[in-house]
Amino acid sequence: MKNEYDVIVVGAGPAGSIAARFAAQEGVSVLMLEKDRDVGYPVRCAEAINKAGVEMFIKPDYKWITADVTKFSFTAPNGKEVVLEFDSVQGYVLERRIFDYELAKTAAAAGAEIITRAYVNGLIMEGGKVSGVTMEYRGEKKEIRAKIVIGADGTESRVGRWAGLQTHIDFRDMESCFQVTASNISVDPNTLYFHFGSQVSPGGYFWIFPKGKDTANIGLGINGAECKKRSSLSYLNENLEKLFPNASILTQVAGGVPCSVTLKKISGEGIMLVGDAARQVNPLSGGGIASGMIGGSIAGRLAGEAVKKNNLSHIFDYDKEWHKERGKTHEIFNRLKEGIYDFKDEDFNKIMGKMLDLPPEKRTMKRLFMIALANKPGLLIDVAKVFLV
C-alpha cells in the first residue's frame, strides 16, 4: 500500500468494485478499501437483480446464481394471487458473498489494489477539497492521499457527510427492513413472491426470493413512519409463522433501505458518491445492485478521465451523466411509488381482482400499474415511459 493514489474507493460492494474497475481501466492508480474482513460479508440484500443489470458488467455464472427468475407472484391482502409469467429469464437471485467477490476480482484484474479490514475514519481536507483519507489498518493509523475519493460506503455513508454533501433523506423514504434466509420451506425456485397489505407489511411489501426449492431470502420493508408503531421484525415473525411455521433460520439481517430519489448532489471537490451512499436505489422496488453498478461505472470512468486529463473538475459531469442514464427513470419510479403509497387493503384487493379477470397472456407489469393508477391519469404517462411491454 502506497501513500498516494490517483483514486481511492471506500467500500467494496458492487458499486465500489465497479467504480474501482472502471477507474483502473483508464490506466490510473486505484486503491479500494473495505472495512470488513472479507469482500461480500456481511450480506445485507434480498439478492435479486434483473438479467440485463448483471450482463452489463459480468458474464452470468451459476457459481453465484442460485435461481433464474421467470415469474412474479403478487398476493393481495385477501389472499388472491396473480402470477406473471415471462417467456424468458428476467433476472436472477444471487449469492452475494460470491458475486461481490467476483466483482472485486474484476477490479483487481483491471489494476486496482484492494485492502480489507481497512477502517476509514476520516477524510483529508485541504482548502475545501477532499485530498485523501485517514484510516486504521492492522493497528496503525495512516493517511493516504488521492486526487479523487469515491464513497461507496453504503446507506450509512460517512464519507459523503465528511465531505459536506447533504446525505440525509426524509425518514418516510427510509424503509425499515428485516430479512432471514430460511430453509425447510417449499417454493417455486423460479418465482419471486410479493405480498401486500396493512397486516403484512404496511407501506412496503413482504418478499420471498428463492435460492433453490427449499431455501429463500424472506423479508419485508415497512415505511419509516410505520416502524414507529411496530417493528419490521414483529411483522416478519408473524408472516413466517403463518406461511412457513417449520422454517429453519440460517441468517438474519436488518437495516434501512433508502427508497428516495438520488441525492441532489453526488459529487464535489475531489469526491464522488456511488450506490446506496448516493441513494442510487430504485425508489419503487428498493433494489439497488444494478443501478449502483451503473453509478459506479460512470463515476469510475469519469474519475479516471479526470486524472488523465489533469482536469479534476471533469468529475462534476457525474451528476448530469447519472441523471441521464438512470436518475431520471428513478424520479419516475418515485412518482409511481408516491401514487400507490396511500393504497388501502381494499385497493390492493380490487387491483388483483381485475388482473385475475384478464387472460394470463395480458397480465403484465405495465397492465398492473395501469389498473392500479387508473384514478391517477397523470401518472399513466410515467407508466408508459418505464414499462414498454
Image: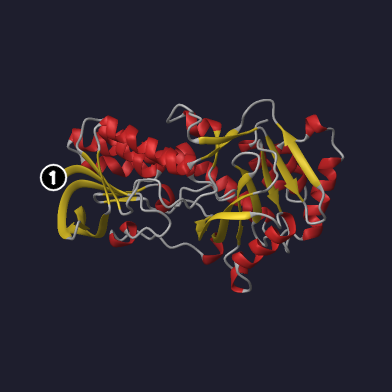
| x and y percentages locating residue 219 in the rendered image | 61, 55
Q: Residue furthest right?
A: 357
| x and y percentages locating residue 52 in the rendered image | 53, 30
| x and y percentages locating residue 239 in the rendered image | 70, 59
Please tell me which residue is depicted at 16% across the width and 50% down the height of the picture.
145
Q: Is residue 235 above or below residue 282?
A: below
Q: Is residue 16 above or below residue 123?
A: above
Q: Amino acid at mark 1?
A: Lys
Q: Secondary structure at mark 1?
A: loop
Residue 127 visible in this rendered orientation of the protein: no
Residue 256 visible in this rendered orientation of the protein: yes
The quadrant of the rendering that contains the C terminus is top right
Quadrant location of residue 198? bottom right
Please tell me which residue is depicted at 34% across the width and 38% down the height of the picture.
104
Q: Badge 1, how many Cα within 10 Å: few under 14, some, many 20+?
A: few
Q: Is residue 22 above or below residue 225?
A: above
Q: Residue furthest left?
A: 3
Q: Is residue 239 left or right of residue 9?
A: right
Q: Is residue 135 left or right of residue 63?
A: left
Total numbered labels placed on residues in the image: 1
Please tell me which residue is depicted at 64% across the width and 50% down the height of the picture.
207
Way the structure is coloured: secondary structure
Q: Is residue 306 left or right of residue 253?
A: left
Quadrant location of residue 292? top left
| x and y percentages locating residue 268 in the rendered image | 29, 51
Find disc 1 in the rendering and name its residue.
2
Quadrant location of residue 1? top left
Q: Is residue 24 left or right of residue 357?
A: left
Residue in the foreground of this view, choosing between 374 and 3 = 3
